[in-house]
Amino acid sequence: MPTVVEFEPLHPETLRDPYPVYARMRAAAPVMWHERLNSWLLTRHAECLQVLKDSRRFAADWRRIGTAVPEHGVSIQSMDPPEHGALRGLLVSAYRAQDMAAVERGAYLHANHLLAGLRAEGGGELMTRFAAPLALHAVCDFLGVPAPDPATFGEMSDAIIRGMDAGLAPERAAPGAAARAGLSAMIASWFEPPPTVGMLGALARSESAAGIPRAVLMNSMRVVFHAGYTSVYSAVGSAIISLLRHGVELSRLGDPALLETAVEELFRYDGPVQATGRVCTEDVELGGVRIARGQALVLLLGSANRDPEAFSQPESLVLDRQPNSHLAFGWGIHACVGGLLAKAVVRLALSSLRENSPRLRLSGDVVHKPQATQRCPDRIPVTFGA
């Protein structure tokens, strides 16, 4: 099982820009073995979509091949049919019961408030001062829970995300597990007593929730909350970088139709989730490669979203791209439950920037967090023009 292209996800150059190595991998071997990850890497849109659509042969739930999964690991993210269906239906119903217009108004007003502080100083660092507090406010408002301290929660979140890369850096596993346990305790405290508003309030009132084991429900809310926060936080920052580096005048986004397609394109062009995993439940062939039952797959969604066989001009930011079959939120039964919220908050963030800071400019080097599974800026220094 030769490795055709060397792929080091945590190398500084890959963290800065993973897309050139993705292109080399797609050209050389769309399905390739990675020794350190003990997994097959999928780089093309076709194979990634094939796997995401086929939960029978490609499982999210490792218990289906006889692998033990700890209690904290059983959630909406790691379950397959038939038990996955009831849980997803419960979460989707609670999600759809929310007043999205009110959540969006709150997020927009908070974005304006955050930008007012930055404008008064002539600029600053956008991830800490804008993207993180906006994401935390929006997701907590949607769930109906009080927002934790941004700095403390940010450290916890970073440790959890770094822990996802433990296959590449084993020293990240223990801090990640400790942070995950801390987040689980915080989630449990939200249900004592249960909230009366938001998505969690809807879950607490749902009779259907009685049939879901408490641990599974708590784990699933941990996933929904944390994935919602990190997706919004990362996507807001990446969207701003992409627009500024391409010289896009924010005034162009005043067209609502263009703003809608632009948000989809920004998720395709440089989305937060770079990879997701599956395991084969039977011997299969993918991209001309035989893969045995029990072997792991890593779907490089960031690479799939730049595949020239799926997108024209894949390396270009085309704000009015239609259609746009990107995989930024996955596909099928495991597609991200919070995708609509993430897109809404990015849209509102860009609208607020357009109205309050149309002459926004980078004022220094952008730095990305040292993590592979989720691509996220760490620092975006900016100035506000007159």
Image (tube, grey):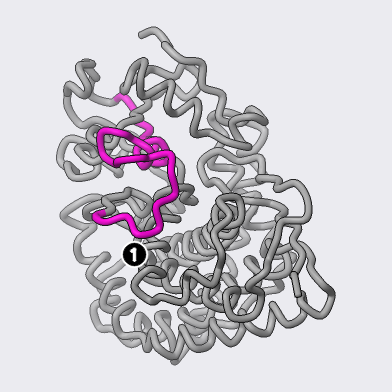
Q: Can you give x and y, in whole percent of width and height, for residue 151 in the image?
A: 74, 66
Q: Say which residue appears at 28% left-offset and 53% top-offset.
A: 324
Q: Can you give x and y, in whole percent of width and height, for residue 120 in the image?
A: 81, 80
Q: Say which residue appears at 52% left-offset and 82% top-offset.
A: 141
Q: Residues within 10 Å of mark 1 (few under 14, many from 20)?
A: many
Res 150 quadrant in image: bottom right
> Is 33 drawn above or below residue 232 in the view shown?
above
In the rendered view, does 361 fall on the left or right side of 110? right
Tell me the magenta residue range: 295-323
Q: Which residue is mark 1?
A: 337
Tell me, yes or no, if residue 230 can be seen here: no
In the rendered view, does 224 fall on the left or right side of 337? right
Residue nearer the viewer, 121 or 199: 121
Amino acid type, callout 1: Val
The quadrant of the rendering that contains the C terminus is: bottom right
Q: Can you give x and y, in whole percent of width and height, for residue 319 in the image?
A: 40, 58
